[in-house]
Each structure stands twice: as C-alpha cells, then as structure tokens.
Image (cartoon, rainbow, N blue to C red):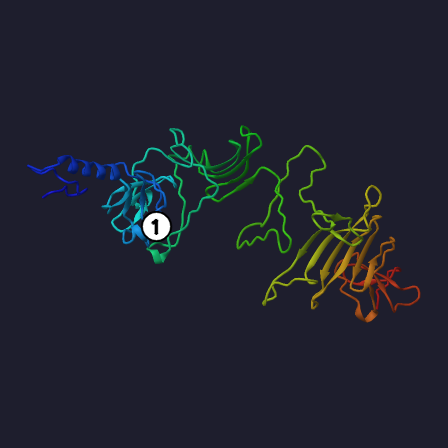
Amino acid sequence: MDQTTNLHLPFIMPSQAQKQVTHNQGLQVLDVVVQLSVLDRDLAAPPPSPGAGARYIVAAGGSGAWAGKDNSIAAWQDGAWSFFAPLAGWRAWIADESILLVWTGGNWARLETTFTALQELTELGVGTSADGSNPFSAKLNAALWTAKYTAEGGSGDLRYTMNKEAASNTASLLLQSNWSGRAEIGLAGDDNLHIKISADGSSWIDALIVDSTASAMTMAIPVTVEVDDGCALSIDLEEGNSVFQATRYAESSNAPVFMGRKARGSRATPAAVQAGDTLIGFRGYGHDGSGFVSGGAGVAFLLEAAEGWAHGTNLGTQIRLFTTQNGSTANVERLKIANDGSLQVRAGAQTLVDANGIIGLRGYTLASLPSAATAGQLIYVADGSSNKRLAVSDGTNWRWPDGAIVA
C-alpha cells in the first residue's frame, strides 16, 4: 500500500530516493482539499488565466482540459490542472456565491438542504439574529405555510397551533407598527377570543370579545360594513326567543337604537336624496312553500324623504306603511304620515282618513252591512234615505241617528 485510503496521499517508502518529491506531492493534495474553497462552480471550461492555486468545481459538460472531470475539484498547480474526485461528505465554500456545498456522493448540494432534522435548537435566526427574548427570529418580506398534500403522504390540512400554559396566560398574534403594538388577536388573559386595538401601543381596547362558551359576543366600538351589492348581514336562527335584541344606555334623550342613512350617487361621491327615497325601511317576507317571497309582496314600514334634500333648507320626511291583502301578491299603502303631520288611512281603494284631515267612513249598502257585534262602530250606508246615511252599532244592531234599527 503506497497511499492513504481517503485522500490518496503518497507514502514515503523505505529506501526511496528523492523523498522530498513524494512529500511535496502530499502537500499539494492537502493544499487543495483541506479547508476547501473554490472560486466558482458554474464553469464547464477552464478559465483563460487562472491564478496559482485557483480551485474550481467543474460544471456538467466539462470541456477542453476539463473534459470528463464533471463535479471534480480542478486546481491550477505549477502551470497545469490537477483534478480531485470528491468523496461523500466533502464540503466546499463557493466564494462567488457565499454558500457552503456538500458532496452527497451524487451531486454538490447546499449544506442546509441535506439536513433531515434539526432538533433541540436554542436559537434560530433567519435574516436576522435571534436572542434570549426572541429565540426564533425572522426578517423577511414574505412567508409561506402550505399543507402537505395527500399525494405526498400528508392529510391536505394545515393547522397552526399556539399553546399557552393556563387560562390566565396569553396566546395571541400581536401586530406592530414600527415596533409598537396596534392590534392583537387571540386568548389574552382568559379563554375567550379577543380582538384588541391600540393607537399608541400602551392603551388597549377590546374591540371584540367572543365568549368561549359561545353564549355572548361583545363589541366595544362602532363597526362599519361596506358592501357593494347583496346583504351586509344575514342571520338564520332556527330556534330562540328573538333574532335581535338591542339595549342602549345613555344620559342624553337623543340616543337612537336604530339609525338609517341614505345617499344617492356612490360611496366616493354621495349625492342628495330625492322625494320618495327610503331613508330607513323595514320589510317582512315569508315562505310560500316554494321559496321566500321578495319584491312587492309582504309588509313594509318605510321612513322616506318627502322632497329633494338641500343642505340647510330642505329636509322633509314622511312615513308610510304597506300591507298585502289576502288573496293578493302586491302590497298597498295603508297609512301615511305626511311631512306636515297630516294622516292618511286607506282601506282597499277607499280613503278613510286623507292627508288634509277629512275623515272618511267605510261605506256599505243595506244588503252588505257588516256585523254590529262591536258597539260604537260608525259606518256610511250608501243607499239609506236622505236623512239616514250614518249608522252606529249598539253591540247587536246597526241604528240610525234617531235610534231606529237599520233595516
């Protein structure tokens, strides 16, 4: 055996002449492969003017003096190229890329990609330095977490778990601006879901708290929902005493629980409302066995603009109530409180009270008199005699003003 097993360094043999030659050959090998650092790994042909001792990893498709030496270490020594085939585990620093590679036995790979596990690390910094307060630190512009797909042996799901020791501790996501907290989401001091906000990083408001028993949700600030079409909020309640309950506590008398606003134009360029525009409306629809009815059916209570609004001068309003008659599919206006306070009440096509303050009685004929079971009802009899047009119920019969029974 005349050389070492791994680096193939030549042995100085007994009685060998010119021992210095053999010794120098071994030094040349050590000079190349120990503390291995190469200038480049992307060249397939030798550089034209290499410096003494320059080392390279021959890229695939080696040509010229590098032909057939792919992945080998090429070193310029004494005016000629020497080649060294790497062994598994050799590491090489790539100077022009500032990365560390390792020979896996089949290719040069980045050192970090060859690890299958990193266990029990006490600190890890990505793009920045970690410390005792932040043992994992990352400074980057984007981060990606993706599920391991079923075809790769995973479940296709992705859950990010943060665990705290006890209910009184905190497990949350803290969002900062220039290292000052502005929002926090998580279990902050209890087991309820908190969404907290801050303007200065020191004073915090619980904007939303959802009880862990799902029995209550508390909102501490006004909420604005902006949508361009459809419903901003839809609630389906299968059982329960009520769908919505609102309680208002205020020292002032002007403290509305419900408030509606309307503008023409767009959110960016709103315009004045016009006469008949609904400022706030309540509509009720039911299911007809085929689907939920919509449109002009059902019942409606509308608070409207009574004129085109103009800033500081014209802000007239009115109220209207609509119902749908049995056997019909379209609602009809039944009551209107006009902008001047006058009242109009309609029954079918007949006006019982008009907007000018004139009361109109429901009209009947002698042959179509309604039940007089409710005393005190007053009606108009269209075909009564000249002095017998008005009739009042006594609880049993309809009577003329003189007391005679209507017959």
Foreground pick, 256 / 84: 84
Where residue 349 sits: x, y (%)? Answer: 80, 64
Residue 62 visible in the snapshot: no
Taking depth in this image into account, of 72 and 371 the one nearest to the observer is 72
Measured from the top left, where is residue 225 in percent x and y?
62, 47
Question: x, y (%) of residue 198?
Answer: 56, 33
Element at badge 1? loop
Locate residue 118 relative to residue 13 in the image: left or right: right
Q: Position of residue 351 (x, y in %)?
A: 83, 60
For disc 1, the marked residue is: 45
Frontmost residue, 194 versus 113: 113
Res. 98 visible in picture:
yes
Count of numbered circles in the view: 1
Front-most of residues 182 and 244:
182
Which quadrant would residue 346 be assigned to in this image?
Answer: bottom right
The reply, left or right, for residue 269 in relation to residue 20 is right
Residue 202 versus residue 38 in the image, above or below: above
View extreme (bottom): residue = 367
Q: Residues within 10 Å of mark 1 (few under 14, many from 20)?
A: some
The image quadrant where one finds the C terminus is: bottom right
Q: Quadrant of the N terminus?
A: top left
Report the residue that reaches farthest toward the left.
15
Q: Is residue 401 left or right of residue 107?
A: right
Q: Is residue 241 above or below residue 136?
A: below
Image: 195 above or below 401: above
The three-letter amino acid code for the residue at tag 1 is Ala
